[in-house]
Image: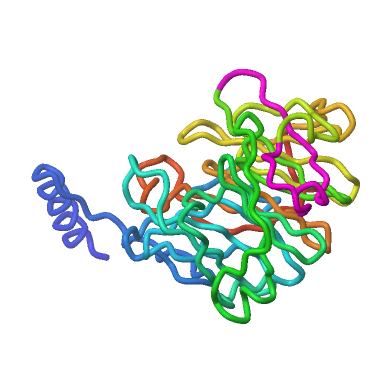
């Protein structure tokens, strides 16, 4: 470029800057990911802690319809996500669905609606081929295959739960469901309740006396799963606060490790290959004013996490 043209361009930049404008480079295109990308926000995904440990990433289902992901479990080669619909920060429940994603490529395989009483389905777990859904004070057992076949929720059993126990999230290990409450303060606990107690004919609510094991639970717990070694993993998040993945001793509940995680992380699941899976609500329409924009379903290699 000749000196004359350079001077003209510099003068043009100065005039535009004085007018409150700038010659900024073109915005980078957002990375393409499997699933339906949000159209209500064109931001790039936020740089998150422990990105090197994150593998496959898919857009959380139903974002453009206002769905907020909560519960997650890995069911064979599928990732199941329980979501409720709300775009209002003051509305913490709404019509809820379970979405089915192919674990290998994130394809949407289908979905089915949950009962109206499960308007904030915080946890999913599967045990003995049965899908369990958690909503505070309630547990629902579903015939998963029949729900998939018909596209309609096929309940097997519902039981009430003492709200001191949650359940705000769910996981399964051995012959028990493990669940606990989300708490910002106090001393919450993680409870193990035999699945036979849940599926038995009794209509009596599940209470503290039904817990086969009780472990101390960190505050801000949003999700849980067991890894292949039997250690407990807890997802912790609360709005714009820093989020964490915490590993607990399954016998004592003592914290073994704690790692920074993407903000807004919710429930966790474990795949057959040993990888963890998680889902985040930061960047959904309801929670689109947080610092983090990461409304994804994502795979985590726990061996690559760094404190």
The x and y percentages for residue 165 are 66, 33
243 or 18, nearer to the observer: 243
Give the residue at x 39% y 46%.
287
Give the residue at x 46% y 56%.
116
- Say which quadrant the N terminus sits in: bottom left
The x and y percentages for residue 230 are 88, 45
Is residue 204 shown in magenta?
yes
Left or right of 190, for residue 32 = left
8 or 131, nearer to the observer: 131
Magenta-drawn segment: 185-206
The x and y percentages for residue 76 are 77, 69
Q: Is residue 261 above or below residue 119?
A: above
Left or right of 229, for residue 165 = left
Residue 55 shows in the view = no
Q: Is residue 266 above or below residue 113?
A: above
- Say which quadrant the C terminus sits in: top right
Q: Residue furthest top?
A: 186
The x and y percentages for residue 179 are 70, 40
Q: Picture quarter containing residue 207?
A: top right
Give the residue at x 39% y 62%.
28
Q: Picture quarter containing residue 6?
A: bottom left
Q: Residue furthest bottom?
A: 149
Residue 196 shows in the view = yes
Is residue 246 shown in magenta?
no
Give the residue at x 79% y 59%.
127
Left or right of 5, for residue 276 = right
């Amino acid at each position: 470029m000749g000196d004359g043209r350079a001077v003209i361009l510099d003068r043009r930049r100065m005039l535009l800057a004085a007018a409150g404008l700038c010659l900024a480079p073109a915005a980078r295109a957002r990375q393409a990911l499997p699933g339906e990308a949000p159209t209500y926000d064109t931001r790039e995904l936020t740089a998150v802690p422990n990105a090197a440990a994150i593998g496959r990433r898919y857009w959380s289902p139903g974002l453009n319809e206002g769905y907020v992901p909560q519960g997650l479990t890995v069911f064979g080669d599928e990732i199941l996500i329980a979501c409720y619909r709300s775009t209002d920060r003051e509305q913490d429940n709404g019509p809820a669905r379970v979405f089915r994603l192919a674990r290998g490529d994130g394809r949407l395989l289908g979905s089915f609606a949950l009962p109206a009483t499960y308007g904030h389905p915080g946890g999913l777990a599967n045990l003995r081929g049965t899908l369990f859904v958690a909503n505070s004070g309630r547990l629902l057992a579903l015939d998963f295959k029949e729900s998939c076949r018909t596209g309609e929720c096929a309940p097997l059993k519902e039981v009430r739960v003492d709200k001191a126990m949650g359940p705000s999230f769910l996981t399964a290990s051995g012959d028990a469901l493990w669940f606990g409450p989300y708490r910002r303060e106090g001393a919450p606990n993680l409870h193990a309740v035999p699945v036979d107690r849940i599926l038995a004919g009794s209509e009596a609510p599940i209470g503290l006396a039904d817990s086969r094991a009780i472990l101390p639970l960190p505050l801000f717990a949003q999700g849980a799963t067991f890894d292949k070694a039997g250690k407990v993993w807890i997802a912790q998040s609360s709005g714009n606060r820093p989020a964490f993945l915490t590993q607990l001793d399954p016998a004592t509940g003592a914290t073994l490790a704690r790692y920074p995680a993407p903000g807004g992380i919710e429930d966790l699941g474990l795949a057959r290959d040993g990888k963890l899976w998680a889902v985040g609500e930061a960047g959904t329409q309801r929670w689109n004013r947080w610092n983090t924009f990461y409304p994804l379903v994502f795979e985590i290699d726990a061996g690559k996490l760094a404190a």
